[in-house]
Image (cartoon, helix red, strand yellow):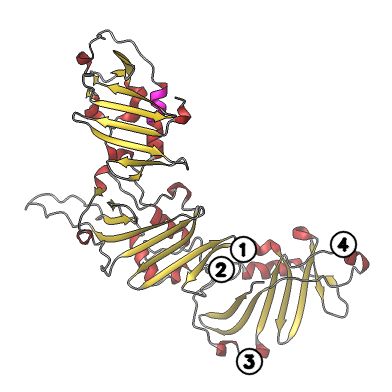
Amino acid sequence: MKLEQVDTVEIERGNPPATFKFVRDAKDVWRMTEPVAARADASAVKAVVDALYKVRPTAAPDLRSDPAAHGLAPPSLRVTLRGGGQASTLHVGDIPLPGKIAYVNTSSRSRPIAVPVAELAALFKDGSRKDGAAGDLAKGANDYRVKQVFAVDSRTGGDDVTAIKLTSKGKELALAKSATGWQFTNPAGWGDAAAVGELSSTNPSAITGVRALLNTIVNLQASTTDDFIDKPGELKEYGLNGDNPDLIRVELKEKDGVTETAIIGKKQDAPAPTAPNTPLAPLPPPKYYVKLEGSNTVVRVNPPPTMDGLVSAIANPDPLRDRDLVKDSDKNRFDAIDITVSGQVTKLRKTGGQFGSWKLYGGPNDPQDANPEVIRKLLDLVTQSHVVKDFPATNDANFTPAETRAEIKLWVDGIKVDPKSDAKDTKAEPKVEGPPIVLQFGKKDAEGIYVRRTLTTE
């Protein structure tokens, strides 16, 4: 069979053999079907397939024709590849000192041959022992499993995630990603969420941006093969029972529409106390029990440094709110600004694209050139990073009387150039289309100034 036809890998280890089976589906995703149903580490399975197609015989001075002389009757390790209606099996027997060669034969050739162990490294555990029966040195089923709870690629920081929902103790935090960034869907009306927030100097575990939230979730993973608990029985033992008030439910939706849901239970019980007069060694933080919906496996995961921040973010998601008054990424796209102070309106319009010039409109001698430095300072002011201190409750008293209120309207790509009309009247005020960002500046006190921001949609 051709390499690309291989869609099933079966590994039999030991005598009597324990069988691991991996199947590639129509989406080119490898899954373990035996001894349990679980996601497989595709790179680990593919490495085995590639190795069997590349391995070549090598010289061995003590090679004998009797399979039993080299641990091949029966072999302690068998690897079968299937695909395209065909199958072929490699038998691996003894690996003698110094662990450089392995004796093998195949389902079509019983006579032993020697091959370099290095070329079959994908089948073996990393360890100090290099010789013995191949089955004793081979990887176990859990070595081929994905260590992460969620299938999201942790290397991308969750870039493929389009929605997040976390619930705990009757509270819900929900976020969705659009073309312009992340927004809150619950609490409703909270607007944008910060992609990257300001780090807290007093609480290193605090989650202050969606990136940190995603990193916390997608990095939930087992650290050893012993962290998988298959067929766990009573879930209450792990704090994963539905009536556990401290249960955390996490939903991730990816751009392909697939949604994965996991529940996070209690911490692993602390180890037994050491004997008296025994030197105390620093203990690692206790692991959490996590279970993916649809799976019959509980996973012990190392808590990320921001694990406590995850619980706090559900209870109070305020630190996740976007602290930018206006996005800095829009600074060079603003082409129309209306400034109203005490009822007087100043209109600024920019023509000629990003590198065009600003002009004043509305006065008796307009249009006239505007001061670009003043406009630059204005835009720097409203787009400065993390300028918002907090989000107080709405109170109209902070914005009265209206006649003393200052207001700025900003349009992003609001001027639509019409070559025909512009050619007829070069002094005409450019037409502005679309909704503006509206900033109303109200009362000022020792803490700062109140600003009401309106982000309208068409």
Q: What element carries label 1?
A: helix
334 is within the stretch colored magenta: no
- Looking at the rendered structure, the kind of residue marked 3 is Pro
- Residue projecting furthest to the front: 85
Marks 4 and 2: CB-CB under 8 Å?
Answer: no
The correct choice, above or below, for 388 with respect to 93 in the image is below
Which disc is residue 419 wearing?
4
* Mark drawn on residue 401: 3
Q: What stretch is highlighted in magenta?
A: 48-53
Q: In this view, does 331 lie to the left or right of 152?
A: right
In the picture, which quadrant includes the C terminus? bottom right
Please identify, in this view, whether the residue under mark 1 or under mark 4 is nearer the observer.
4
Kindly identify the residue that appears in the image at 76 percent across and 58 percent down.
355
In front: label 4 or label 2: 4
Q: Where does label 2 land, which residue?
A: 324
Q: Within 10 Å of the Cα at label 3, are there few (<14), some (14-19), or many (20+) other Cα atoms?
A: few
The tag on residue 328 is 1
Cβ atoms at labels 1 and 3 below 8 Å apart: no
Q: Which mark is residue 39?
A: none
Q: For marks 3 and 2, give the CA distance.
A: 26 Å
Quote the CA–CA distance across marks 3 and 4. 43 Å
